Image (cartoon, rainbow, N blue to C red):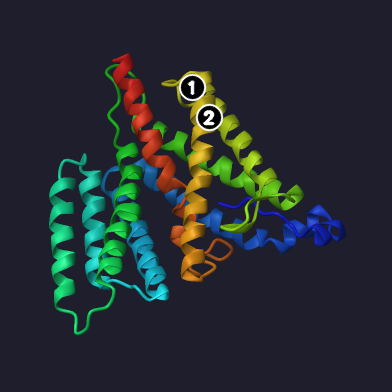
Amino acid sequence: MNSLRQDPGQADRETPWRRFVRANIVPRVLVILVGVPLLVLAALRGGLVFRMLIGVLILQGLREFTAMTAAKGYGPCKPLSLAVGLACAWAGASSGSHLPLVLAVAIVLVMIVELFRREIRHPIVITGNTILGALYVGWLGSFIVQLRELPSPPGAGYDLGLRALGLMAAITWACDTFAYLVGVAVGSRPLLERVSPRKSLEGALGGVLGAVAAGVTASATFAPFISLAQGALIGLAGSVLAQAGDLVESLLKRDAGIKDTAGLLPGHGGVLDRMDSVLFTAPFVYFVIVRLTEYRG
């Protein structure tokens, strides 16, 4: 997510169009034109196809997180880190009932592995990084699958999981897009400069308005399980979480001394750069929808 701000002097010299061109709009759009249809088709199909696609994205996100910690000098055992992260993702996507067992085994195993290193090399930090990556990318990422697989209420006549996933995606995308466009066009006041100097207050407010509008629009069109007021509130809270997720990842990258988690997606960075907001909004929307449908049931 981006809520970019411009240098005041530079902003005075540039037209809005030049700012958009300089902000790498073209490669961003090309990635979206390829990636979004693929995600939509997988979401419509659901089941194993969707699980596999999200699994691939989570795996790449874990690889990027591991590389980020390695850049800091505290990289865990990569195969073990990926295995633990995927295990947490699987446990979370399987209704979460296996998560306590997976976590217990993972924590014990990760700590035992540190005993056999040739030299003692920050075992507390390395084991912590392994578990953090598993929970941050693997477990939080599993809520994307859990959203898609929400069961529809009796007699609903629609696929609740698909529409709940669409609600989450619409709010996150609208927040991301409006924050970016408003930030590039008029952003001047820093939002949290010590974490992400280029993100602006104007962009953040644009993201909030975009997400609220998306929540209300979703309620009026494809999300009949929430009222207009609920759509606005979900959009408001979702925008705060989406931007918090983006800032948290910016904080981690700043600590690691890197700009992007990878160069896999031109104009977008890595998979983790694209998933940072979703990792925070997906669990929120999941629990809200579960609560609302249980209450109405």
Please give left or right for residue 228 compared with residue 189 in the image: left
Question: Is residue 249 placed above or below 231 in the rendered structure?
Answer: below
Residue 278 pos. (x, y %): 44, 46
Q: What label does residue 93 carry, if any?
A: none
* Pointer 2 local density, CA inside 10 Å: few below 14, some 14–19, many at least 20: many
Quarter of the rendering containing residue 168: top left
Residue 273 pos. (x, y %): 49, 58
Task: State the residue at coordinates (49%, 55%).
Answer: 274
The amino acid beneath tag 1 is: Gln
Task: State the residue at coordinates (51%, 51%).
Answer: 246
The image shows a total of numbered marks equal to 2
Residue topped by disc 2: 215
Residue 175 pos. (x, y %): 57, 41
Asked whether residue 157 appears in the rendered view, the answer is no
Q: Along the line of sight, which residue is nearer the eye, 54 or 246? A: 246
Residue topped by disc 1: 230
Tags 1 and 2 in contact by the CB under 8 Å rule? yes
Question: Is residue 115 placed above or below 65 in the rendered structure?
Answer: below
Q: Along the line of sight, which residue is nearer the eye, 83 or 54? A: 83
Please give left or right for residue 267 compared with residue 91 in the image: right
Nearer to us: label 1 or label 2: 1
| SS for callout 2 | helix
Q: Disc 1 and disc 2: Cα gap in Å? A: 8 Å
* Pointer 1 local density, CA inside 10 Å: few below 14, some 14–19, many at least 20: some
Task: State the residue at coordinates (53%, 38%).
Answer: 239
Q: Along the line of sight, which residue is nearer the eye, 194 or 143? A: 194
The amino acid beneath tag 2 is: Gly
| SS for callout 1 | helix
Q: Quadrant of the C terminus?
A: top left
